[in-house]
Image (cartoon, grey):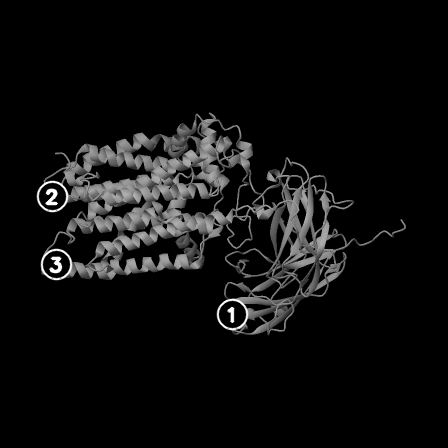
Amino acid sequence: MPIHNDQRPRLRGRGPYKPLGLILAAFLILGVLYSVLNPLFEAPDEVWHYEYVRWLVEGHGLPRPEQVGHAPWHQEGSQPPLYYLIAAALTRPIPTENAAQVIRYNPHAAMGHPEAFGNKNVMVHGRADAWPWHGVALAAHLIRFFSLVLGAITVIATYGTALAIFPGRPILAILAASLVAFNPQFLFLSAAVNNDNLVVAASAVGLWVCVSLLKRDDPSGDVSPASWALLGLLVGVAALAKLSGLALAGLAGLTLLMVAWQRRSWRTLLGGGIIMVAVAGAVAGWWYWRNWQLYGDPLGLRAMFDVLPRRSEPPTVDELLARAQGVWRSTWAVFGWFNVLADDWLYAIYTTLSLIGLMGLVVAWPWRWLQKKEKARTETSPTWVTLAQLALLMVWILVIFLALLNWARMRYPQGRLLFPAISAMAILLGLGLSAWLPRKRTTLWAALLGAGLLFLAAWAPWRWIAPAYAAPTLLPVGTELPNPLAVDFGDRARLLGYQIETPEVQPGQRAILTLYWQALRPMDRDYSVFLHLVDDNGIVQAQRDSYPASGALATSDWPLQAIIPDREAIDIPETAPAPARLRLDMGLYDYATGQRLPVGQDDHWTLGYITLRSKPGTSGLPNALFINFDDQIALVGFDFDRRVMRPGETLGLTLWWEALTVPKKDYVAFVHLVLPPDAVWAQQDQMPQRGQAPTSTWQPGQRVEDHYQLTLPDQAPPGVYFVEIGLYDPATFKRLPVNFSDKGIVLGQVKVEPLFRKSSNQ
């Protein structure tokens, strides 16, 4: 028997779907806005997703094992290819010979560091990717619009799924669709080149089909083969879009079991299963068979992890809990390459909204249901089928969450990995929110909530995305500048002036300054600015390397008749020795070769001096700081007895520890004197106070003074060494982590001079 009308995921009647048109129109307008305001390839992995598409357009074919780790698509070539094949077909007519001019990496990019000053851009942007688009820029934006269409499909599926579960409650469908369409993170992803968009859309439509198949009026009715074929097709599409799409097969199988049990029909179970497996296998099976033949791994994870290595150890429960905030935030609004955050108040709004929705789902909605059940059964009262559909949504959310948790054991979790279940999450959240809405004027309150979500989504790209990549406003030649000068760097650039905004700083703070440049002639390469803070011993205590304007305006894009303001900031390490007077040296160099542009007879220019003040505090310790070792012990101060030494001499180091609790074990402290990158020339490992103060005897708040001596051998080469310290368990050699990292803590630097110096007369 054919499937009943209300079992099909289609638009039934025009009335309930009129609001969907408005939501879709707003979503598409916002999506275009996000696509335009977010510079090209400034979404996570976007440049590698595009490089895979370009690879296919250029006729290289699907990747082979020998290309893994060498092709420009990084790890993306190991992924199922459907999204990339469609994108390649869309962009094949567009010539992309200008790829080298558009795809320019910023070597100083602050990926994953939202606290960084500037350099949010992973790519260098200039004339080649500006409007009007052509070549690579045109092709990439066309793929972004394709992604936006996939996002629109997800919004439609969310609306349709909500109506399939609650056909008499269009307000719920409006709320659910709004929660998806006006989620800034979903808009950001939908306006980027990313295969997540296809697996999210296929999952959302697949969930719509699943909940529709559970709905029936005729107990003896059967489901048409076409319905199972459609579900199998969606499983195949999802599995051929991304590995996480394989999870949809489990949801489809669960739906099949529920429908077969509902009808008490073995025919439904066997027939539907055969059809789904056959269709899904025909669509995606070849890819997994190919992986098996090429890599010995049907999932292709071996190829992925050759480029993107697994974590050496799975995260602890504490680390997972600490990273949960990042996952939550990146479900709503984390932009760029995880380095552009929204203000805290925005996350507070979404968290509050979610908590209200969750409480409504757990408390308010069941209470309303029980009240209605006592009075009379109404159209909106949930039936067994409704509860089964809601259970399916919850199971789907749980499956995707467990998949995210499994990924977190291998790599680092992100909120977008939850988006295959975004429609289910939005429907349940909308159900909880609607349970609190007043019975009178429900439509008005729902409209106000949707309008608020729309406003936040529309404001986000202007408030956080666009400013992160904005180039400085150029000044006309002749503008009066602070500290005017005329210092030429080679025959390419001239420093016209500068301003040091923070002449006095403390360890852990930033020294901020602005340089004013002028191009002397067009430049064919992108030079980096270096800024060094050098102490009296010639040791660089802090430095910054960046493309000009904190990465926002590369030298190859400098106009000739303008002054370029270049605002920079130097982060002073917490361990920088204070007080001190630091010399500020600066210059320009070619990042690829390290070659500096000459300044007269020198290779740098000294701008002036910055005073480094000691941190105020009551500890009375030198170089006071606070480094937390696994919430057990903190390093609260340190001191070197010298900063310059020669081979054969001994560096005296004093550490001050403080117990944060009673330490679990008797830990050993290690102190290394290291010549970069990792040559250890002197070290000392001991329990504090040479074993006289074992850590397990410390009491909370107790402070322990600890002394070490590091003697360099006579053959130690000259150079600038760094002092590295840490704590470890002598039984297992496992180090106590600091911020979930077991890398040693660098306390400072020591200059090692040659053992013998030639006299000036030689």
**Element under disc 3:** helix
**Residue 52 seen:** no
Q: Which residue is mark 1?
A: 660
Query: Which quadrant holds residue 326?
Result: bottom left
Check the picture and name the quadrant holding the N terminus.
top left
* Residue 741: image location, x then y, percent: 52, 56
The local secondary structure at tag 1 comes to loop
Helix or strand or loop: what does disc 2 sit on?
loop
Q: Amino acid at mark 3?
A: Lys
Residue 254 on image: x %, y %: 24, 44
Choose the circle earlier in sequence order: 1 or 3: 3
Q: Residues within 10 Å of mark 2 (few under 14, many from 20)?
A: few
The reply to whether callout 1 and callout 3 are in contact (CB within 8 Å) is no
Give the alpha-carbon distance from disc 3 to disc 2, as whole Å.
Answer: 20 Å
669, 108: nearer the viewer: 108
Q: Amino acid at mark 1?
A: Leu
Q: Nearer the viewer, mark 1 or mark 3?
A: 3
Q: Residue furthest right?
A: 761
Check disc 3 and report the residue beneath it. Answer: 373
**Residue pictured at 28% horizontal, 40% vertical:** 205
**Residue 235 lies in quadrant:** top left
Between discs 2 and 1, the one toward the N terminus? 2
CB atoms of marks 2 and 1 within 8 Å: no
Disc marking residue 673: none
Q: Is residue 731 above or below residue 14?
A: below
Q: Position of residue 10 (x, y in %)?
A: 21, 38
- The residue where tag 2 is placed is 217
Residue sitting at 55 percent across and 67 percent down? 634
Q: Is residue 533 visible?
A: yes
Q: Nearer the viewer, residue 387 or 187?
A: 187
Residue positioned 47% across, 30% down in the render: 54
- Neighbour tally class for label 3: few under 14, some 14-19, many 20 plus, Cα within 10 Å: few
